[in-house]
Image: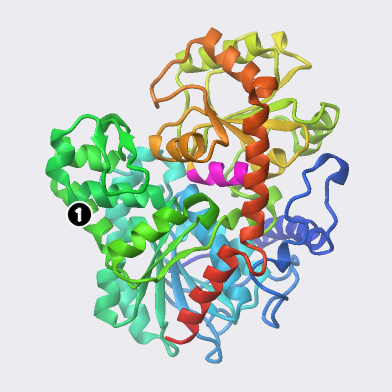
Amino acid sequence: MIKWTGDVVNAYSLVLFSFSFCFENILTEKSVFSSKNHKQINKAQEKLFSPALDSSTKPITATALHAPPQNAGEMTPETRPGNSKPHIVVFPYPAQGHMLPLLDLTHQLCRRGLAVSVVVTTGNLRFLSPLLSAHSSESISAVSFPFPPHPSLPSGVENVQDVGNSGNYPIMASLRELREPIINWFRAHPNPPVAFVSDFFLGWTNDLCRQIGIPRFAFFSSGALLAAVVKFCFDNIDLVKSTEPIRFLDLPRTPVFKKEHIPTTVRRYIHSPSPELEIARNSYLENILSYGCVFNSFDCLEDEYFEYMKQKVGHDRVFGVGPLCSVGLDPSGRGKSGSDSVSDVDTKALLTWLDQCPDGSVVYVSFGSQKLLTKDQCNALALGLEKSMTRFVWVVKKDPVPDGFEGRVAGRGMVVRGWAPQVVLLRHMAVGGFLSHCGWNSVLEAITSETMIMAWPWGAMNAKLVVDHMGIAVRACEGTETVPDPDELGRTIQAAMGNDGKEVRSRAAEIGKRAVKAVEPGGSSWTAFDHLVQELLHL
């Protein structure tokens, strides 16, 4: 059972008031920040994917927070979707890079007249509060279950952000234990769901859907190139084992990757097969057997890989509906949860500092929510930034920033500890480059912000796409454990932000405009999303 105290509700009220203020300004095509200093992107967010707010969508107010289910898997009358709307289930995987885009998609599904039940464990319920406040109880509800314990996970850990990437396999194993509770909830529901949309890390839900007799749509929070590479690897294990580097002859453009750069699950499966990895492999292959596949990507970026996936799955129910970061809720709080520490530099102070910088002169530096840099990596990065003589904002978590560094770069650089509003910062006119690990969400947020990427990829797929295929990024470094040469890194940053990077920055701006057009009425992603909605409405 979930207990909501008055203090919790009051705390959420403050958060939701800020969401209301920011989102209302988006609706009226005004900005809570100075329009002079923000890239003219996505002005009328509510025009995207849907021509107008439907009657089930309420303004975001502090009083709109839904009461959660009283018991595990139970829905109260206040949270039960009404019988008048087609009812679907959404099951996100509890990691920030997975949850954010699927909840963005859920927001749009609600706006198109579907009733959505979102399956989460109790500890992840807090991530739903913006959605629950933005829509009526007839449109969206939370179905929460206690998190099944796992011997490899500390008590209370229910999200990858609490334990890091090492927690993926045990969390995936724990979530498989929810199969019977979900089936029991489905069978007891007065208005059973007609479809199931779940993250591609939850491939086992396809077999669950066979059992209850409804179609499952696999949601890929990452791109179609990655999906194609994993599919090829699992279909050609002997070839992948015996070849170095691996030439993907079956894929568009015939990409070539070293073994060390193929996805971690495939590498582990090849070198150290185990029952756990066999389950992971089978789970992935279940995604390909699903009724439909939904990608957080768009035609301009990956059209050829969408076509490849259509050939492999044997049907046309492959939907590129991204970039979903352009059609979600208020970007100023994107990715922040109640457990995030408060940044030492508040957003207003940071934006004020950026306002004083020339357009395109600042490098934004961030490496996602999961990985901490080592001391040697931090030392090399700090020295590289110092040598580049370029303005920068460096977002760190608990990374060991060298002593004295901040004093040496005072006035030219800022170090932000904790959480920062990445989308808002990338869209600021002063930000001209993004030194990134090339996680998919970060790639899409950079693209939609028309910001060039300086890639330090910790996985080669996305970097291959943005550097080699699209020409909207430059390579700064490569590898999760790599310690860059500070002199070389400094020169790369300086060159990318100067005249040498002018062509790449121009290309990034061009692709960014096309990305935003993709989710506008008539765009490729808008059309694909409409086809997805029609599929769901007619099941």
534 is within the stretch colored magenta: no
Q: Residues within 10 Å of mark 1 (few under 14, many from 20)?
A: some
Read off the magenta span: 440-447
Residue in the picture at 27% in, 49% down: 250
Could you tell me which quadrant the C terminus lies in? bottom left
Decide: is 35 above or below 206.
above
Instruction: Give the residue number, with chain letter if any, for mark 1.
Output: 279
Residue at screen point 34% across, 73% down:
291
Horizontal side, residue 120 vs residue 247: left or right: right
Q: Is residue 182 left or right of 392 when viewed as pictured?
A: left
The colour scheme of the drawn protein is: rainbow
Q: Amino acid at mark 1?
A: Ile
* Camera-nearest residue between 515 and 411: 515
User: Viewer-proximal residue, 180 or 459?
Assistant: 459
Q: Position of residue 244 (x, y in %)?
A: 21, 29
Q: Is residue 446 magenta?
A: yes
Q: In the structure shown, which secondary structural element does the residue marked by tag 1 occupy? A: helix
Q: Nearer the viewer, residue 178 or 388?
A: 388
Q: Is residue 44 above or below residue 190?
A: above
